[in-house]
Image: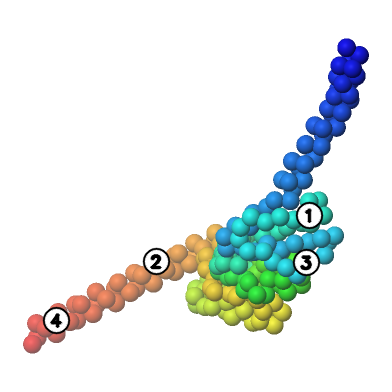
Amino acid sequence: ARFLLSADLIMATIAPFIVAAIVLAVVLVQSSIHTIAEGYVGVYYRGGALLPELTEPGLHFKLPFITKVESVQVTVQTDRVTNIPCGTSGGVMIYFEAIEVINFLEKSKVFETIKNYTVNYDKTWIYDRIHHSVNQFCSRHNLQEVYIDLFDTIDDKLVEELQRDCDLWAPGIHIIGCRVTKPKIPDAVLRNYEAMEAEKTKYLMTVQRQRVVEKEAETERT
């Protein structure tokens, strides 16, 4: 009986340690196992330093608590830059609600790009550059040019400028295209443009009717 009592006492004493060891083992396993999704590669940091090796999509292991993993997309993605204010050369403040930039990061350049600009490289070379380029464009042109005359050229200009900067400083980033929404302009100015468009449409319709009448008159004479 004394032996059984001693065994029970020992088990009662070590049981919390056994439970703690099991919990620790589960935590270590969960912390070390990770998955990299298709279309991404894994990059790793140890002690804050970026490691040179990358991992492909699938199940992988890392040192728990010591190594940190980040997934970096290497397929085509769309970055949406929103609420971009800019002032025209005439001093009118307008807003671009959204500009979408279609781009991808070359897999062979992932380490170099992440080392130089972190996993948030697109903030430096897409988001911030879009704001800068749009503001420069607006400052060189008046409202009529930005809103009407040159609007259809903005996307090509942005692609050209973004790619030029990336080729110089971050050559792994490839800009495929841009989609630019019509900017928001002050309501009073917008009403003027709408009135001008309505007058222009009426004028064109009048001219067209006049041509039809002249054509009919010419036909009757012949």
Q: Which of 203 and 22 is in front in this view?
A: 22
Q: Report crowding for label 2: few under 14, some 14 to 19, many 20 or more residues within 10 A (C-alpha).
A: few
Q: How far apart are marks 3 and 1 (CA)?
A: 13 Å
Q: Which of marks 3 and 1 is in front?
A: 1
**Lateral position of residue 121 relative to residue 197, left or right:** right
Amino acid residing under circle 3: Leu
Q: Name the residue under label 3.
A: 51
Amino acid residing under circle 4: Ala
Tell me the number on the disc at residue 63.
1
Q: Nearer the viewer, mark 1 or mark 2?
A: 1
Q: Distance between the residues labelled 1 and 4?
A: 90 Å
Q: In this view, does 143 lie above or below 57?
A: below
Taking the view exactly as shown, the residue that stands out farthest to the top is 1
Q: Nearer the viewer, residue 175 or 54?
A: 54
Q: Which of marks 4 and 2 is in front?
A: 2
Q: Name the residue under label 2.
A: 198
Tell me the number on the disc at residue 85.
none
Q: Nearer the viewer, mark 3 or mark 4?
A: 3
Marks 4 and 2, the one that precedes in the sequence: 2
Q: Report crowding for label 3: few under 14, some 14 to 19, many 20 or more residues within 10 A (C-alpha).
A: some
Query: Residue 144: percent from the left, percent from the top?
Result: 53, 74
Q: Which secondary structure lies at badge 3? A: strand
Marks 3 and 4, the one that precedes in the sequence: 3
